[in-house]
């Protein structure tokens, strides 16, 4: 497969969006996964609203493409995660 500018093995700031159920507790679980695995988080925001089923965790993490795939797989294994996506703007 040909290489692209985003697939060169060098870390880049990757925007990740995670949708979780379970409110603050489960959003913090996502943040703790990032912390406990020593990911280089550049920005982090939580959007938790009363009466809304899903909460949003948005972060920017310094990762290679391979590391991005691994992080997304780890996030998707959490029971409360509805979806986790790399939100690259192309």
Image (cartoon, helix red, strand yellow):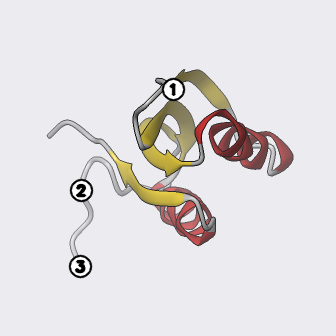
Say the numbered circle drawn on residue 48: 1
- Disc 2 is placed on an element classified as loop
> Can you say whether 47 is above or below 32 in the image?
above
Residue that appears at 36% across and 49% down: 86
Residue that appears at 45% across and 35% down: 56
- Rounded to the nearest angstrom, the CA distance separating label 3 from label 2 is 9 Å
Q: How crowded is mark 1: few (under 14 residues within 10 Å), some or many (20 or more)?
A: some
Where residue 46 appears, x then y in whole percent? 54, 25
- Disc 1 is placed on an element classified as loop
Q: In this view, does 53 lie to the left or right of 36?
A: left
Residue at which label 3 appears: 1
Residue that appears at 23% across and 79% down: 1
Say the numbered circle drawn on residue 73: none
Say the numbered circle drawn on residue 4: 2
Question: Which residue of the protein is positioned furthest toward the bottom in this rendering?
Answer: 1
- Rounded to the nearest angstrom, the CA distance separating label 2 from label 1 is 36 Å
- Disc 3 is placed on an element classified as loop
> Can you say whether 38 is above or below 72 in the image?
above
Disc number lying in front (3 or 1): 1
Where residue 69 appears, x then y in whole percent? 48, 65
Residue that appears at 59% across and 38% down: 23
- Rounded to the nearest angstrom, the CA distance separating label 3 from label 1 is 40 Å
Earlier along the polypeptide chain: callout 2 or callout 1?
Answer: 2
Which image quadrant for residue 67? Answer: bottom right
């Amino acid at each position: 497969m040909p290489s692209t500018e985003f697939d060169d093995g060098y870390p880049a700031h990757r925007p990740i969006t995670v949708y979780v159920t379970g409110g603050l507790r489960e959003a913090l679980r996502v943040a703790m996964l990032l912390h406990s695995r020593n990911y280089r988080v550049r920005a982090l925001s939580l959007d938790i609203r009363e009466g809304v089923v899903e909460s949003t965790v948005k972060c920017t993490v310094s990762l290679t493409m391979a590391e991005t795939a691994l992080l997304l797989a780890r996030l998707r294994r959490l029971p409360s995660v509805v979806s986790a996506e790399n939100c690259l703007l192309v």
